[in-house]
Amino acid sequence: MNWPVALEKRSDPSPRLRYVLPAVAIGIGLLLGAMVLSFMGAHPGEAYQEMARGAFGSVYGLSETLVKATPLLLAGLGVGVAFRAGFWNIGAEGQLYMGAMAGTWMALTYPGLPAPLLQPLMIVTGCMAGAFWGLIPAVLRTRWCVNEIITTLMGNYIAILWVDFLVYGPWKDPRAFGFPFAPPLLQTARLPSMPGNRVHLGLLLGLLAATGLTMLLKHTRLGYEIRIIGLSPGAARYAGMNLTRTTLLVMALSGGLAALAGVCEVAGVQGQLKHGLSPGYGYTAIIVAWLARLDPWATIVVSVLLGGLLVGSDMLQIAMNLPVAVAYMLQGLILFSVLAVEFLVGYRLVWKDAR
Amino acid sequence: MELSLVPLLLEAAVRAGTPILLVALGELLAERAGILNLGVEGMMLVGALTGFIVSQQSGEPWIGVLAAAMAGVMLSCVHAFLSISLHANQVGSGLALTIFGTGLSGLLGKSFVGVPAKGFAPIAVPWLADVPLLGRMFFQHDPLVYVAYLLVPGLWVLLYRTRPGLKVRAVGEQPRSADALGISVVVVRYSCVLAGGSAAGLGGAYLSLAYTQMWVDNMTAGRGWIALAMVIFGGWNPVRTALGAYLFGGVQALQLRLQAIGVTVPTYLLMMTPYAFTILALIIASASRARGHVGTPTALGRAYIRGE
């Protein structure tokens, strides 16, 4: 083709560009979203202003952004570590629900336990349930090469239906006026939160998890194996690494982290297990992990940004009567932009006659 | 269960299997060319909504179907551009498409929830519909069911008995050799992904214009993902994929029937069966493939970059 410009692969992809990439991608995604919104007859400038004001414009807004960033951070870390190991875990949503369910079971079964004992137990049971839910697709893949994308996704539907079964059936609170809610947790089961707002211990757990995960990936043998397996399973096998064992460990960890998000959402925010507990945190977590380039530290920043996006779209619903689906549309556009921008980071445009 | 229920159940199985089948055939074509499109769920949703809106406005379901297919093509263009031209990660691009399609359809469809629209009525196929039992089960359906019937052998012939089909398979197996032979990998891949997109839109329109004749937010309920599973279950073969889709339809129909007659199993547990069945089908297919029946296109999911 005789185009005046050509794409040339960069010999070393610019590291500086890598850092600004998420910001650029979010910008482009929002710009594309503005086009869709104006097509719908909504004023995009006004809408974005409303979102920004709602999410970051006040102390209350900021606290709500952190409340929504908490499950995104935990589940995003889980998704990220699985992706690192080359395991496409799309099942964070289901793992989150399993965690929420098991944590609630603990709280409802042993209501008499004191808080310092009950809460760790809830967290441990929740994480175990999520790890179990994450291990099923891992076992299926390592044993029979069953495609994990589909099994983890099917697991989401099954887990959500399982929770629905419980809250519409055996666990339904007779005093909930017919709403599909499990009985509210006692105060001893509620995670401590900041005075005056809903920011709870889960955020601290998320920050600890990010730190722990960074240490694991950078300074341990398992972390090294995870990175090698993700980059090149063939090389990992050649080097004598046990791929099955590592995959299982990673998925237990990944499912456990997503489940922790679920326990925290019940015990920190909602106070009870209910239908529609998560507005798709497990799916947004995929976007979070991708934008953060699977880096635990970056996941903290990105989860706050996307938490703000979720709070902002809630505001849109109130102020401009736009459905919450706006958030999903924007998330899809942002991920599209990331992928396109990633390409530009690896290449550069050169003028042909200049060479 | 009474014996007279069986034909009724099979009839329902065909209806429930058709949207899965339409979508799966399109995905099969794209995957045969080496492009994995995880965006089918999103394309299906946008297709369902587009078909519904256009049919509601025009009063003609066929125009709705056409519009739905076009919507699928437009969305698949994004995936094709990112994954083929920009060598983007196909899993990422597909997931983005599904998330985007879910959001877009929820956003644009808000004012159409609960609105009636003109859908398809069943048409009896002359002659065949009069065959005892079989006629009732297979030939008294809406026209899109027959479209799906025709697409199965059509796609098989295309893939295994024509030159374009050979090119598709070559591009999906050995893109470098295909390129060396003068086949344009880019053109073949774009064509297959776009055709797959139209099929996903069609499958969506089947849901909103034939299966239920209404628009409900998120009405696909994972059917796009199940279609992806059926492609694997069928070993990338149109005929076996069709068997899988109708088998799935059978499970779905049985589940709905059991709900209707009010068995003692709680509804939410019954509603899990299609998803559990899908996992089971994948295990069976994958476990048997591990014994030597390999069908995955070799270049599936990998970008083709000339000169690398």
Image (spheres, coloured by chain):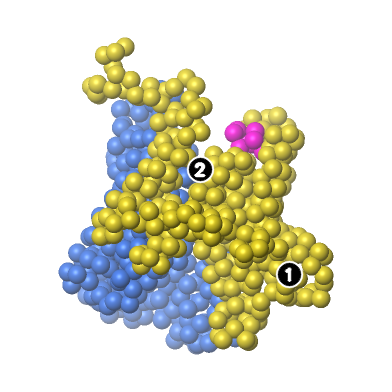
- Please say if A134 is above or below B81: below
Q: Chain of mark 1?
A: A
Q: Quadrant of residue A322?
A: bottom left
- Please say if A218 is above or below B193: above
For badge 1, the amino acid type reads Ala
> Crowding at label 1, few (<14), some or many (≥20) Cα neighbours within 10 Å?
many
Horizontal and vertical percent for residue A69? Answer: 57, 54
Q: Quadrant of residue B169?
A: top left
- Please say if B277 is above or below A333: below
Per the image, label 2 sits on a secondary structure element best described as helix
Going 62% across and 86% down the picture, which residue do you hit?
A175
Count of marks placed on residues: 2
Going 55% across and 81% down the picture, which residue do you hit?
A179
Q: Nearer the viewer, mark 2 or mark 1?
A: 1
Work out whether residue A326 or residue B73 is closer to the camera in this orientation and state it. Answer: A326
Chain B colour is blue
Horizontal and vertical percent for residue B243? Answer: 44, 62
Q: Earlier in the sequence, mark 2 or mark 1?
A: 1
- Please say if B231 is above or below B86: below
Q: Chain of mark 2?
A: A
Q: Would residue B184 be found to the left or right of residue B98 on screen?
A: left
Q: Main secondary structure of the magenta part?
A: helix
Q: Which residue is mark 2?
A: A291
Going 31% across and 63% down the picture, which residue do you hit?
B108
Going 57% across and 68% down the picture, which residue do you hit?
A277
Q: Which residue is mark 1?
A: A189
Q: Reply yes or no: does residue A337 show up in magenta.
A: no
Chain A colour is yellow
Work out whether residue A216 or residue B214 is closer to the camera in this orientation and state it. Answer: A216
**Gap in Å between the C-alphas at discs 2 and 1?**
34 Å
Q: Which residues are magenta?
A: A226-233
Work out whether residue A58 or residue A154 is closer to the camera in this orientation and state it. Answer: A58
